[in-house]
Amino acid sequence: MNNKINNKINNKINNKINNKIGRNDKCHCNSNKKYKVCCLKNDDNIKNESIDKLDNGHLISSNNLKECYDCIIEIYKNYKIIDISNYLTNNTYETYQKKHYYGKVIMMAERNTINDEIFKTRGPENVNIIILFSGSYKCFNFDDFYVAFDMVIDMIKDRINNR
C-alpha cells in the first residue's frame, strides 16, 4: 500500500516537473475542475491537429505547386509530397525538416505572408517556391521551374544516396 502511494506521489511530482497535467489534476484553465472533465478532450484535439499538419501538410494551395507536385511525383511515385505553405515559419522549419529527415516525404511551399521570413533567409528576393527534402532545400522562382527542376531532382537523389 505504501509503495502505491509513493508511486502516485512520484508520478505527480514528475508530471509537475515535466509540466504534464495528470487527468485528475486541476485544469490549467483555472476552472477548478479536474483536467479530464474540462480541457483534456480539446487539448487532445489540438495535439492531433498539430500532428496531422506535421505529417500531411494541407491541400495543395496553388496551381504552381500543383505543377511542381505533378512533375516530382512522376519520378518519385513512392514518396509523399506535401504542401506546407501555410504552416512553414521560422518556428516550424526545423521541426518539419527533423520530422521528415529519414522519411519518404518531399515538402514544398509557395511564398506567402506566413512563410515570407523563411524565404528571406534562404534565397534571393525573387524566389517564390521552396522544395525541402531530408534536411536540404532548393529555392527558385516558379517562372524558372523547368530549369530548377533538374536541381531539385539532383538534391533529392543526393540526399537519398547520402543517408
Image: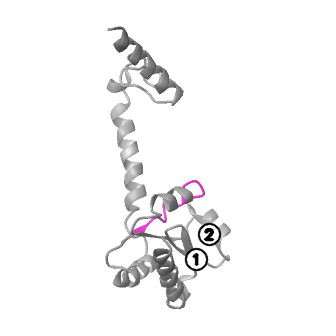
The secondary structure making up most of the magenta span is loop
Is 91 within the magenta? yes
Q: Residue at x 50, y 88 (%)?
A: 150
How many labels, in total?
2
Q: Are marks 2 and 1 in contact (CB under 8 Å)?
A: yes
Residue at the disc numbered 2: 119
Q: Residue at x 47, y 64 (%)?
A: 101
Q: As shown in the figure, which amino acid type bears the numbered disc 2?
A: Phe
Q: Residue furthest front?
A: 3
Give the residues drawn in magenta, as a range: 82-93
> Quadrant of residue 36 in the image?
top left
Q: As shown in the figure, which amino acid type bears the numbered disc 1?
A: Cys
Residue at the disc numbered 1: 139
In this orientation, which residue lies closer to the viewer: 107 or 141? 107
Residue 94 seen in render: yes
Is residue 77 rendered to the left or right of residue 96?
Answer: left
Is 143 within the magenta? no
Q: Position of residue 102 (x, y in %)?
A: 44, 64
Quadrant assignment for the N terminus: top left
Q: Residue at x 39, y 51 (%)?
A: 51
Q: Residue at x 54, y 85 (%)?
A: 151
Seen in the picture, residue 78 relative to 43 is either above or below; the reply is: below
